[in-house]
Amino acid sequence: EEGFSNIYIHLDLDALDPVFFPHVMLPCPGGFDPEGLLSIFAGLKEQFNIAGYSILEYSPRNGGGLELLQPFVEFGLDL
């Protein structure tokens, strides 16, 4: 925390547990659950200025997963 106030959040969707979000090329069993990760992001937003935000590695299976991504997209749009 000390010495900086700006951060960049890079969300690689592979970090989400495939139980919750299987729409990636390299699933990570035991990864984050979406609600928990959004809670972490909210805490970061309270403590730092978020200078940038990206979402990467979306690889839809049968067009799915968009509804699960919506809260992450909204988080970015609210910055």
Image (cartoon, rainbow, N blue to C red):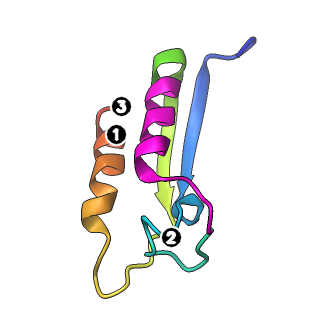
User: Residue at left 43%, top 29%?
Assistant: 42
Task: Check residue 79 in the rendering and tell me which mark sits there, or answer none.
Answer: 3
Amino acid type shown at disc 2: Pro
Q: Is residue 19 left or right of residue 14?
A: left
User: Residue at left 53%, top 60%?
Assistant: 16
Amino acid type shown at disc 3: Leu
- Write the start and end of the magenta stretch as one range: 29-44
Q: Does 64 sit above or below residue 70?
A: below
Q: Which structural element holds mark 2?
A: loop
Task: Check residue 18 in the rendering and tell me which mark sits there, or answer none.
Answer: 2
Label 1: which residue?
75
Task: State if disc 1 and disc 3 touch (CB < 8 Å).
Answer: yes
Q: Nearer the viewer, mark 2 or mark 1?
A: 2
Dividing the picture into quarters, in which one does residue 59 lie? bottom left
Q: Residue furthest right?
A: 3
Q: CA distance from mark 2 to mark 3?
A: 27 Å
Q: Nearer the viewer, mark 2 or mark 3?
A: 2
